[in-house]
Amino acid sequence: MENKLERKYGLITAICMVVGTVIGSGVFFKAQNVLIATGGNMPLGIAAWAITGLLMIICSAQFSVMATRYEKVSGVVDYAEATCGKGYAYYLAWFMVNIYYPGMTSVLAWVSARYFGVILGWDITGANVMTLAGFFLIASYTMNALSPKLAGKFQVSATFIKLIPIFLMAIVGTVVGLANGTLTGNFNNIVNEVSGGTGAALFSAVVATVFAYEGWIVATSINAELKNPKRNLPIALVVGAFIVVVAYIMYYIGVAGGATNEVLMEQGATTAFSNIFGTVGGTLLNICIVISCLGTLNGLMVAATRGMYAIAARNEGPSPHMFGQVDPATNSSTNSSIWGLFVCAIWLVYFYGANLTSGWFGLFNFDSSELPIVTIYAMYVPMFIMWMAKEKELGVGKRFVLPSLAIAACLFMVFAAVYAHGITPYLKASAEGGFSFPVLFYLIVFAAVLLAGFLFKKVGKRQ
């Protein structure tokens, strides 16, 4: 390939990829879910945010160690190739480019449009919001395809903007809550006892926070474009993870200073923001949420547009020469970007039909933003096991202790996803009735996509 992706991104951009992709809309509404799960037990809720944050930090720390050893084209795919071989890396990359990245990217396009529609009073499942979601998807693709540097600058800007309301609420909410006694009262008051006791309540709260921490792995997708990746990527993964955890816990505490637990459980955390900063403040919060979601959308689109390039750079998959082309003027993987947009559009249509209508796909209706977590974390486990088998020159800590903890964290993430969505059939609590098999039928789709990857892999080898 005559042209290659340039090293155009620095450490700040990489950190913002971690922070900006993880922090989207989840932090603003998951506080309510955590309070409900714990029965209004604030200390238990803080423990849940901290535990899940620790799991993310452990996984990101393991990948940061891998980043110091392996570096080629696309971060996590490089690590998979180095530990488990080219075949495993190919199927991981194929899954990420055709399910993981586009599934989450398409949903973030809708979430961005949804919060914008709330400001204008639109129906969040109506044609206006879906049209705007399509526009956001195309606009994000266009920026990444025509000006990757601009996309990087937007990621940095959006990350700083989204942190403003979070830390503002964290600081002002805590001060106001301590001054008027609301924060102290919330810490000492449990609204209701949760069935199953403290252990069950804590686990339910942890499950509620799992998906608010997802997306950090996206930062590894710019490995080929990151300056000094063996230094900057490990720093970005660890520092970015710590920033996210601190931001989430501080925001959760700040929210408790703006309203009582009962009100927060009934009306949501945004009520606390309006109570402290007024109606105008509530509107500004919605604007910040839109920017926050657009920042996350951009981070995911960065990864989605580079997926086929990561495969083609290894001379794998369909038409490696075509998908491996880099535009000499924009220094972007143009054909790979087109494929990324196409698959994102497919998943946007699927998300609308499966989740915002009565269900176009029958038994195959599932949450395309959260269920890929079932497989992505499961696919990390063999990599960590092979790391322990191969890296014989490392000390006990980096060779055995850290990857063992990372394996435990991954298995918990998988269990949490299955627990939250259910793998066995259950009766729908709706007027339509019927049975739902969300995880099971998602896994069928996953298997079908990997089968397509197998067929394309064979075709690619014959070409």
Image (cartoon, grey):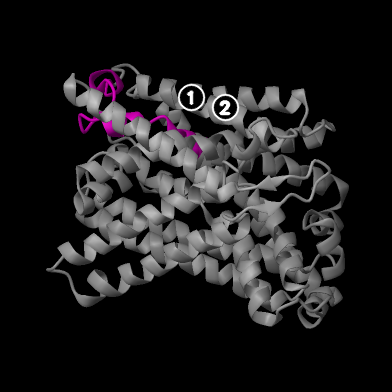
User: Looking at the picture, which amino acid does disc 1 mark?
Assistant: Leu
Res. 335 image quadrant = top left
- Can I make out residue 219 in this image? yes
Res. 306 image quadrant = top left
User: Looking at the picture, which amino acid does disc 2 mark?
Assistant: Leu
User: 49 left or right of 455?
Assistant: right
Q: Is residue 122 above or below residue 278?
A: above
- Disc 1 versus disc 2: distance between alpha carbons? 8 Å
Q: Quadrant of the N terminus?
A: top left
Residue depicted at 64% across the width and 59% down the height: 167
Residue depicted at 18% across the width and 26% down the height: 461
The picture places residue 62, in percent across and down from the top left corner, at 33, 62
**Residue linked to disc 2:** 137
Res. 78 image quadrant = top left
The picture places residue 427, in percent across and down from the top left corner, at 72, 52
- Can I make out residue 15 in this image? no
Classify mark 2: helix, strand or loop.
helix
Residue furthest left as drawn: 393
The picture places residue 123, in percent across and down from the top left corner, at 82, 32
User: 314 left or right of 421?
Assistant: left
Q: Quadrant of the C terminus?
A: top left
**Residue linked to disc 1:** 341
Q: Say whether residue 304 is magenta.
A: yes
Magenta stretch: give its range.
Answer: 298-325
Q: Is residue 164 above or below residue 407?
A: above
| CB contact under 8 Å: marks 1 and 2 | yes
Q: Say whether residue 232 is magenta.
A: no
Residue depicted at 29% across the width and 61% down the height: 384
Q: Is residue 409 above or below residue 320?
A: below
Tell me how many marks there are.
2
The picture places residue 183, in percent across and down from the top left corner, at 79, 74
